[in-house]
Image: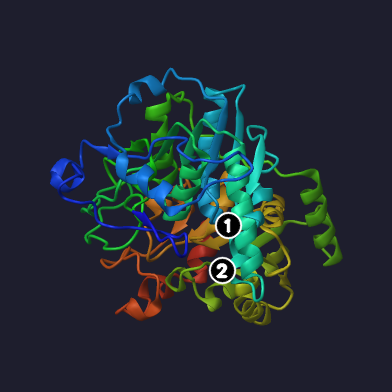
């Protein structure tokens, strides 16, 4: 990893074979990291010179020595890094709870994007949110201001004098935040491991996916003083995140996924529903048809069929999603008259409030699915290209509807990559989803 002195950007570079034990085949045993607090300048003026950062990175090659000591060490100022996306943020909540249990008197801050901050801001285990306005960089005419705000953020992180940083994001940008903090202990996942055939409790996968998470990315592992080992990829993301507990000495209590919403969010949701003719006592079904990957979208006809059936049974049906989902939601609403379309009108926290109000939520593999799981709400999620054992609703296999095809999961993101005409999603019918929802609702009563 190096820093371009002209742009101040951090780039990856291959370690020198003559100096790096990693390059000499010692990657399993040797962890590289930078030494803490090697910046010049005051807390209000952070020295970001490329020479200083490069010297930190190049001069520090250490093992996870002292890892056993972390289990008894005390930290008073902790930064948890997981800016996005919504599902990943929800997956990180159990880490926050475990950190609070381990360090009850510590200040624990979370570096997160503004759009996701309200999902965690009111959690009793959290001290503060540290806002990273990542989207400002893509706003027309805002790039220069975004750069200035980014440097202000770096100063804010530096001034906080964190002594422990836990980076659950594992990219070069989050690693830079960890470095800038000057924390003496910086923890993140180890370098990527190879994919292997997966055998899980739910199904024996016949293929070996070539895509998906398999470790820290973009050389970010170099920034950590201690790396979280990755013994297997056949584990749910929440359990994987909690592997950090083996370093810090977390308790053995079950993970706590709960989202804590503000009373204001609850009132906002109730008011919005009332304005659309849904009184407080009327049963509600929430459909969230959006997701980022093209391949994870269940069909418009499928969601519309579910909406029509529940409307026929006397439920109110509401559509929710982000602005990028508006066209899809409009199609579904047109095909299921009477459906309330709230797409593009809710924040992530509002979405959580809407799901909390609902009798059941129907989703793709998306952040909304993880929100429903964290709220312990009845739900049904349609899966195809991704593995529900790894990123499905946590400990809720009954909530997953999928067809058993030899190509699934493939972890392809784009439809152009699929040679089978998106069969894994097109073969899931609305009748299958409605039937599963009925069973789950009956079991919940």
Question: Relative to residue 420, is residue 312 depicted above or below?
Answer: above
Q: Residue drawn 55% across and 52% down?
A: 83
Residue drawn 27% across and 44% down?
Answer: 232
Where disc 1 sits, the SS reads helix
Do callouts 2 and 1 mark residues in contact (Cβ within 8 Å)?
A: yes
Label 2 neighbour load within 10 Å: few <14, some 14-19, many 20+: many
Badge 2 or badge 1: first in the primary sequence: 2
**x and y percentages locating residue 309 in the rendered image:** 63, 69
> Does dot 2 land on a helix, a strand or a loop?
loop
Q: Position of residue 41 (x, y in %)?
A: 56, 41
Disc 1 crowd, CA 10 A, few/some/many (<14, 14-19, 20+) = many
Colour theme:
rainbow
- What is the spatial separation of the Cα atoms under label 2 and label 1, in whole angstroms? 9 Å
Say which quarter of the image contains residue 369.
bottom right
Residue 134 spot, x, y in % from top left: 58, 60
Q: Position of residue 312 (x, y in %)?
A: 69, 69
Q: Quadrant location of residue 34?
A: top left
Q: Nearer the viewer, residue 105 or 266?
A: 105
Q: Is residue 403 visible?
A: yes
Q: Pointer 1: what residue?
A: 368
Q: Nearer the viewer, residue 199 or 416?
A: 416
Q: Indicate whether 115 appears above or below 191.
A: below
Q: Which of the two residues, 5 or 297, is positioned nearer the viewer here?
A: 5
Which image quadrant is residue 417 in?
A: bottom left
Query: Quarter of the image containing the C terminus?
Result: top right
Note whether 174 is above or below 319 in the view shown.
above
Asked whether, in this view, residue 258 is left or right of residue 389, the answer is right
Q: Residue at x 43, y 62 (%)?
A: 383
Read off the residue under disc 2.
290
Q: How many marks?
A: 2
């Amino acid at each position: 990893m190096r820093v371009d002195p002209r742009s101040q950007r951090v780039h990856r570079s291959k370690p020198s074979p003559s100096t790096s034990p990693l390059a000499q085949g010692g990657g399993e045993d040797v962890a590289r990291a930078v030494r803490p607090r090697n910046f010049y300048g005051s807390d209000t003026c952070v020295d970001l010179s490329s020479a200083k950062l490069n010297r930190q990175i190049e001069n520090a090659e250490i093992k996870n020595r002292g890892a056993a000591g972390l289990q008894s060490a005390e930290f008073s100022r902790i930064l948890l890094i997981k800016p996005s996306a919504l599902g990943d943020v929800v997956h990180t909540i159990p880490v926050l709870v475990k950190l609070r249990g381990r360090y009850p008197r510590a200040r624990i801050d979370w570096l997160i994007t503004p759009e996701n901050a309200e999902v965690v801001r009111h959690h009793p285990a959290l001290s503060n949110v540290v806002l990273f306005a990542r989207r400002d960089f893509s706003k027309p005419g805002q790039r220069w201001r975004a750069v200035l705000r980014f440097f202000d953020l770096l100063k804010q992180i530096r001034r906080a004098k964190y002594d422990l940083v836990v980076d659950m994001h594992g990219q070069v940008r989050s690693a830079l935040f960890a470095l800038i903090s000057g924390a003496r202990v910086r923890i993140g996942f180890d370098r990527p491991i190879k994919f292997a055939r997966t055998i899980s409790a739910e199904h024996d996968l016949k293929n070996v996916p070539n895509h998906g998470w398999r470790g820290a990315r973009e050389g970010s592992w170099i920034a950590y003083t201690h790396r979280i080992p990755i013994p297997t990829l056949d584990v749910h993301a929440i359990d994987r995140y909690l592997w950090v507990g083996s370093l810090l000495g977390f308790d053995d209590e079950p993970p706590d996924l709960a989202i804590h919403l503000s009373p204001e969010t609850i009132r906002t949701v109730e008011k919005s529903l009332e304005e659309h003719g849904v009184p407080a006592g009327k049963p509600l079904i929430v459909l969230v048809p959006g997701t980022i990957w093209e391949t994870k979208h269940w069909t418009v006809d499928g969601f519309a069929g579910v909406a029509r059936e529940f409307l026929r049974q006397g439920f109110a049906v509401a559509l929710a999603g982000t602005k990028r989902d508006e066209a899809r939601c409009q199609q579904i609403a047109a095909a299921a008259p009477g459906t309330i379309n709230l797409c593009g009108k809710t924040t992530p926290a509002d979405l959580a409030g809407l799901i909390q109000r609902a009798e059941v939520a129907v989703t793709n593999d998306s952040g909304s699915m993880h929100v429903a799981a964290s709220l312990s709400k009845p739900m049904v999620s349609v899966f195809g290209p991704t593995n529900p054992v790894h990123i499905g609703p946590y400990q809720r296999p009954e909530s997953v509807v999928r067809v058993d095809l030899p190509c699934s999961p493939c972890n392809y993101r784009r439809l152009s990559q699929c040679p089978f005409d998106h069969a894994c999603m097109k073969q899931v019918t609305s009748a299958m989803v409605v039937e599963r929802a009925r069973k789950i609702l009956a079991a919940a009563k």
